[in-house]
Image (cartoon, helix red, strand yellow):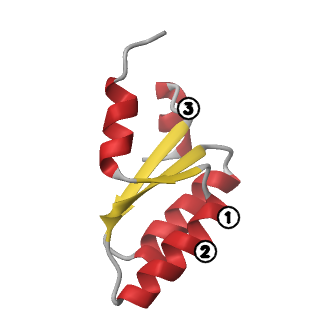
């Protein structure tokens, strides 16, 4: 998807999961942040080539790039929470 398509849809927030924490996931989040999107990473839906790589991405890099680093169940609870 291009930025224009996301703009047409009114998208302001990206929720990211993926296979390689320190490559595609981080670069997608960083690109989204640079374009002005709010970025949430789903920590337990992101893979890595090793546990130390995953820890470095999730605990160090993602908090500098995104607005939030949360687990899938936390995200789903927020999405399904009744409006106040």
Q: Residue furthest top?
A: 84
Measure how far apart labels 2 and 3 are at the Cα level.
Answer: 30 Å
Q: Which residue is mark 3?
A: 7
Measure how far apart labels 3 and 1 are at the Cα level.
Answer: 24 Å
Numbered circles on residues, count: 3
Front one among 27 and 54: 54
Label 2 vs 3, first from the N-terminus: 3
Q: Is residue 42 left or right of residue 22?
A: left
What residue is rendered at 53% in x and 81% in y?
56
User: Foreground mark, 2 or 3?
Assistant: 2
Q: Position of residue 29 (x, y in %)?
A: 54, 59
Measure how far apart labels 2 and 1 are at the Cα level.
Answer: 7 Å
Q: Which residue is mark 2?
A: 60
Q: Is residue 38 left or right of residue 77?
A: right
Secondary structure found at label 1: helix
What residue is rendered at 36% in x and 59% in y?
17
**Vertically, is 63 above or below 53?**
above
Front one among 8 and 32: 32
Secondary structure found at label 2: helix
What residue is rendered at 46% in x and 26% in y?
9
Q: Which residue is mark 1?
A: 64
User: Foreground mark, 3 or 1?
Assistant: 1
Mark 2 near mark 1, Cβ–Cβ under 8 Å? yes
């Amino acid at each position: 998807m291009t930025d224009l398509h996301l703009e047409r849809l009114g998208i302001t927030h990206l929720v990211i999961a993926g296979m390689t924490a320190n490559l595609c996931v981080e670069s997608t989040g960083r690109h989204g942040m640079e374009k002005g999107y709010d970025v949430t990473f789903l920590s337990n839906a992101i893979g890595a080539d090793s546990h130390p790589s995953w820890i470095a991405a999730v605990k160090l890099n993602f908090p500098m790039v995104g607005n939030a680093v949360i687990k899938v169940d936390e995200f789903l609870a927020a999405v399904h929470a009744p409006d106040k």
